[in-house]
Image: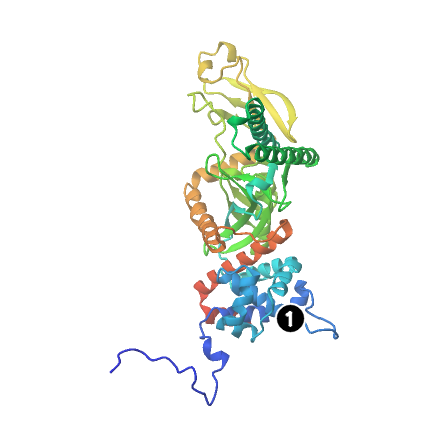
């Protein structure tokens, strides 16, 4: 007697064929995808052909194509060609689309042509989460991460890269010319066929030099002195590793600290985060729909103007200040050792002297007040304070905003740990899902569409984990 489970005979006829519904369990996540898309007003969101006029060849409804993409990003399938194959063989996707199997070009064009509408769908899901009251605390952690574009480092040029590449080419040309000179002096020293090969190599190197000359002229007309040949919007960006970098985009995310949901996101091609704090915080506040909010960020976001903009928008920013001064490291007093007296508009130095206001200036768009004490030259503690004759103290006109934020940070030492545990986990998950080449599309608008689909899939999976499939379907229908 066989002790194995028998399969179904492929040639056996069935009186009643199985229904598609029988292949998808009640708690299958595809039911959430189906319910969510069916509840959307696609024409209001801006999808093309949602209200297609009669006439011509019938088109695929945007709902079917949107379901395919959401399912794909939920299951780490971003390629349109792979989605085409899955639509033909994957039972979950066959159930989701009702046996529709569009070709890869139709699938790819849908993502390319409906970027704004797909981003709106991502926002609509966040609004659904808000209506389900999962955002009890209006606190977000903001961070950015670099994602690799389809543009390789070899096809990205900066002024420094052009100079380095030109030097390499010049050295190679000099080496080949020296070999040709040696062949002219004594042809017996050179193997047969080597001379034509060297001349061919020299011709290619001269062509590369001409190409570098053209690129150098283009660099002069670009505002950031950088050119990418494959993806014109991709930029070379430094990463956390010393001496490393990536040609890609800077993805920004504001993550709810309670459930780790991405409440707001954006994509830029700026290699730093200093100008992103206020914009991301305002987006997150709008997504929460609250009057106030707290935003946590790391030192890379510290910018006086950005912090002031958050305060003016009723957002409490908590951003540690970078330790850029060498005074403390060298055993001297730093600015925190000087106590400001607001009523007298002066500072008390560690030696007990008064550093009074001297003049006001404007630097980089900031109004700055300068202070120092007349007692500095004869102060016995001057060597512990400064290497100059006077210790000058600079105070921004809105310095009280930064001081108030620092007091809040000192009172909440756990902020850095909360931020790290919240947002870095999210980026680690997204990068794991998207793989070694996370971005498949070119130019900033299309990359934003890609990231929106990834964020939507991440949030949907998180909510299914929190609420369950049946709970999500009921909430969508409510």
According to the image, label 1 marks what residue? 61
Judge by depth and name the residue closer to the eye, 270 or 182.
182
> Looking at the image, which residue is at 51% across and 26% down?
189
Left or right? Give the position of 31 relative to 331: right
Image quarter where the C terminus lies is: bottom right
Picture layout, residue 348 above or below residue 288? above
Q: Which corner quadrant of the image does residue 395 belong to? A: top right
Q: Residues within 10 Å of mark 1 (few under 14, many from 20)?
A: some
Residue 86 appears at what percent x and percent y? 52, 67
Q: The N terminus is located in which quarter?
A: bottom left
Can residue 39 be seen here? The reply is: no
- Number of labels in the image equals 1
Question: Percent from the top left, x then y, of residue 53?
Answer: 74, 72
**Colour mapping:** rainbow
Q: Is residue 113 above or below residue 32?
A: above
Q: Secondary structure at mark 1?
A: loop
Pinpoint residue 96: horizontal percent, then vertical percent.
54, 72
Residue at 49%, 57% in the rendered image: 136
Tell me: 342 left or right of 423: right
Instruction: From this view, report whether residue 196 is shown above or below residue 230.
Output: above
């Amino acid at each position: 007697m066989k002790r194995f489970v028998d399969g179904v005979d492929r040639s056996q006829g069935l009186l009643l064929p199985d229904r598609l519904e029988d292949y998808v369990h009640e708690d299958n996540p595809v039911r959430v995808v189906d319910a969510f898309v069916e509840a959307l007003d696609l024409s209001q969101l801006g999808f093309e052909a949602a209200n297609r006029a009669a006439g011509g060849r019938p088109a695929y409804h945007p709902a079917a194509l949107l379901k395919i993409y959401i399912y794909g990003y939920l299951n780490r399938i971003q390629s349109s060609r792979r989605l085409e194959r899955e639509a033909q063989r994957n039972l979950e996707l066959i159930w989701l689309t009702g046996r529709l199997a569009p070709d890869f070009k139709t699938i790819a064009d849908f993502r390319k042509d409906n970027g704004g509408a797909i981003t709106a769908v991502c926002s609509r899901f966040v609004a659904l989460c808000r209506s389900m009251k999962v955002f009890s605390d209006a606190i977000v952690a903001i961070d950015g991460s670099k994602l690799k574009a389809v543009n390789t480092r070899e096809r990205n040029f900066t002024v420094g890269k052009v100079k380095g590449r030109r030097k390499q080419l010049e050295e190679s040309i000099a080496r080949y010319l020296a070999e040709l000179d040696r062949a002219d002096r004594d042809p017996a020293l050179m193997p047969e066929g080597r001379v034509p090969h060297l001349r061919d190599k020299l011709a290619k190197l001269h062509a590369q030099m001409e190409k570098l000359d053209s690129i150098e002229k283009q660099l002069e007309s670009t505002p950031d002195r950088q050119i990418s040949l494959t993806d014109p919007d991709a930029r070379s960006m430094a990463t956390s590793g010393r001496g490393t970098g990536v040609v890609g985009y800077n993805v920004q995310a504001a993550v709810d600290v309670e459930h780790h949901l991405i409440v707001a996101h954006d994509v830029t091609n700026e290699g730093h985060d200093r100008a992103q704090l206020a914009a991301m915080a305002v987006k997150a506040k709008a997504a929460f729909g609250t009057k106030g909010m707290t935003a946590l960020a790391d030192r890379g976001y510290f910018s006086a103007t950005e912090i002031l903009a958050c305060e003016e928008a009723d957002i409490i920013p908590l951003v540690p200040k970078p330790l850029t001064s060498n005074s403390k490291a060298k055993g001297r007093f730093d600015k925190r050792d000087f106590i400001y007296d607001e009523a007298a508009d002066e500072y008390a130095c560690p030696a007990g002297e008064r550093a009074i206001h001297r003049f006001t200036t404007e630097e980089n768009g900031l109004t700055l007040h300068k202070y120092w004490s007349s007692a500095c030259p004869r102060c016995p503690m001057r060597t512990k304070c400064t290497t100059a004759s006077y210790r000058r103290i600079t105070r921004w006109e809105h310095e009280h905003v930064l001081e108030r934020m620092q007091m809040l940070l000192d009172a909440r030492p756990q902020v850095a740990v909360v931020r790290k545990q919240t947002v870095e986990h999210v980026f680690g998950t997204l990068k794991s899902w998207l793989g070694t080449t996370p971005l498949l599309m070119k130019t900033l608008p299309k990359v934003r569409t890609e990231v929106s689909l990834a964020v939507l899939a991440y949030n949907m999976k998180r909510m299914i984990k929190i609420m369950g499939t049946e709970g999500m379907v009921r909430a969508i229908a409510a």
